[in-house]
Image: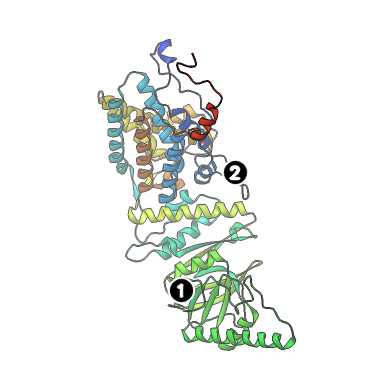
Amino acid sequence: MGSAPPSPSPQGLGAGQAARAPQLSSLAAVQSLASVLRPCYGPLGRQKLLVPARGASECTGSAAPILQALRLEHPAARLVRDVAQRQAEQSGDGAACVVLLGAALLRESEQLLAEGLARPHLLRGLERAATECGALLPELAVRALGPLEDPRWALAATVGPHPPGLATLVAAACGELREPEGDFHPERLTLCGVLGGRPEESRLLPGLVLAGRPCGKREAALNGARVAVFSCFFGPPGTHGQSRARLDNAAELDAYATAAERWAERQVGQLVAAGVTAAVFSGDVDERAVAQADRRGLLVVQVRAPDAALLSRTLGVPLLPSLLPVTRPAPCRRVYPQELGDSSFVVFELDAPTLTLLLRGPTDAGLRASERAARQGLAAFAQLCGDPRLLPGAGASEMALSARLGERGARAGPPDGPGLLAWARALRELPEALAENAGLEVPGVLAQLRGAVQAGHLLLGVGADGLIDVALEEVWEPLATKAQAFRAAAAVAQQLVAVDDIVVARQLPATPPPRSASLDRHKGKGRPRKGPRGR
């Protein structure tokens, strides 16, 4: 990462004080990282064209893939990136919030240190401000998701408006997969992207839908099936490995074919005797083995290796590396093929509620964006199952929290007051980025929003044309996700403030080999000996 310009000097400092070296060695690197994500923050943010060293390029405005694509050299920037990625993995959202808020807290800390605040006092003030923020945040939660309520309105902002109808599909899947006791298992929803068609053609399908095809005459098991999953080749030995049979005449060829037929008959018979009625393979399939399976009524399905691993995890059975022995086939209601567009799929309807969200789109980048948005919605609903409280989005919560922390910081004296005020100023970074990305006049919009908060209007946020009513626009954020992002940003900022210097281990030059004693003796030959006779 390149170095960012130094932060502006606080007012009241002399020229000599303003020109001194920065107090935080990690500030420039973290600000550079934040400058990459800031234009992408919010629903109106711009996108980045990611060009990896390997693989296809991608246009995205999501923080997680952008952070993953960056090559960072500064250890502080890597630390912030790791914390933000863990936030995205655990909550599905909030990675950009962690980076922007962490960088703003470091900038405010730099100014306080430059003004003469002692570092221990600053750390104490930041700690108290983070505690106050965690205590005040639940007071801003004005809505909660009911146990039997349709979650579409709560997930609309997280999933986003593009592609159309995706939030409705994700909400319907969450409602069907949520158990009456309140437990939610997001792993029971499989995302399947099919290239081609329009995004509006995406739909929910019952069961687990995998890209594959039946290989024999039997194409379905509609009255119950017992499934075994294999990662090996289905056929006689010697026809798929590196070794090949050497045949010299027609009699040897006939004997070899007969032995292969007997092997296939014996292996298929043992699978049927073990109770297997549907065998799923990720390797190649031999025609003679499939012919024997047709005679015994065994359904043979060929899928990709990742899908075989997914089916194994979903069914709760091991992925077998060889045909025998079969430990325990899994029961399945129905197994049948289905044509979707130009692709062939196989549907596995399980006893447990399992769904597949079929995503359609004209480009691979669009399918990846839809899959990422759907996963964010699933993660948000999982958070709401544990804590159903919701915060106003669009910067409304950050501005209201900033106003309350600012009031407490003005009343509190040193050493806690400066930390509270630093947090209050840093929180304004998020609605400011929303207004900037929307193309609005940032000072005017923030002044209007600050005045609305002081008047008690806590449901006003930043929209495309100015201030919007969060309740009417259905812009809500899970309280658990926002609180976790604030804690992560506070922790990484306090850790970097406490760093005095960055010590990087460098590779030492190779030690020269020890000199040989014989070499020294040869070097000494021919030289005059020092002593009484040589004088």
| SS category of the residue bearing label 1 | loop
- Of 453 and 49, nearer the camera is 49
The local crowd at label 1, few if under 14, some if 14 to 19, many if 20 or more residues have their Cα within 10 Å, is many
| SS category of the residue bearing label 2 | strand
Determine whether 149 is above or below 353 in the image: above
Q: Position of residue 188 (x, y in %)?
A: 44, 65
Would you say 414 lies left or right of 484 here? left
Residue 303 appears in which quarter of the rendering? bottom right
Q: Position of residue 40 (x, y in %)?
A: 53, 39
Question: Which residue matches tag 2?
Answer: 50
User: Mark 1 or 2, which is nearer the eye?
Assistant: 2
Asked if residue 102 shows in the view, the reply is yes
- Of 349 and 463, nearer the camera is 349
Number of marks present in the image shown: 2
Amino acid type indicated by mark 2 = Leu
Question: Which residue is pictured at 36% across the width and 47% down the height?
Answer: 479
Residue 379 appears in which quarter of the rendering? bottom left
User: Considering only order in the chain, which callout, 2 or 1, is on the residue closer to the N terminus?
Assistant: 2
Question: Which residue is pictured at 46% across the width and 32% down the height?
Answer: 30
Q: Position of residue 248 (x, y in %)?
A: 73, 82
Would you say 106 lies left or right of 294 here? left
Would you say 262 lies left or right of 173 here? right
Determine which of the numbered discs, if any, sits on residue 467 in the image. Answer: none
* Residue found farthest to the right: 249
Q: Position of residue 170 (x, y in %)?
A: 48, 58
Determine whether 51 is above or below 15 in the image: below
- Of 372 and 328, nearer the camera is 328
Question: Which residue matches tag 1?
Answer: 350
Amino acid type indicated by mark 1 = Leu
Question: Which residue is pictured at 46% across the width and 62% down the height?
Answer: 172
Question: Which residue is pictured at 59% across the width and 83% down the height?
Answer: 218
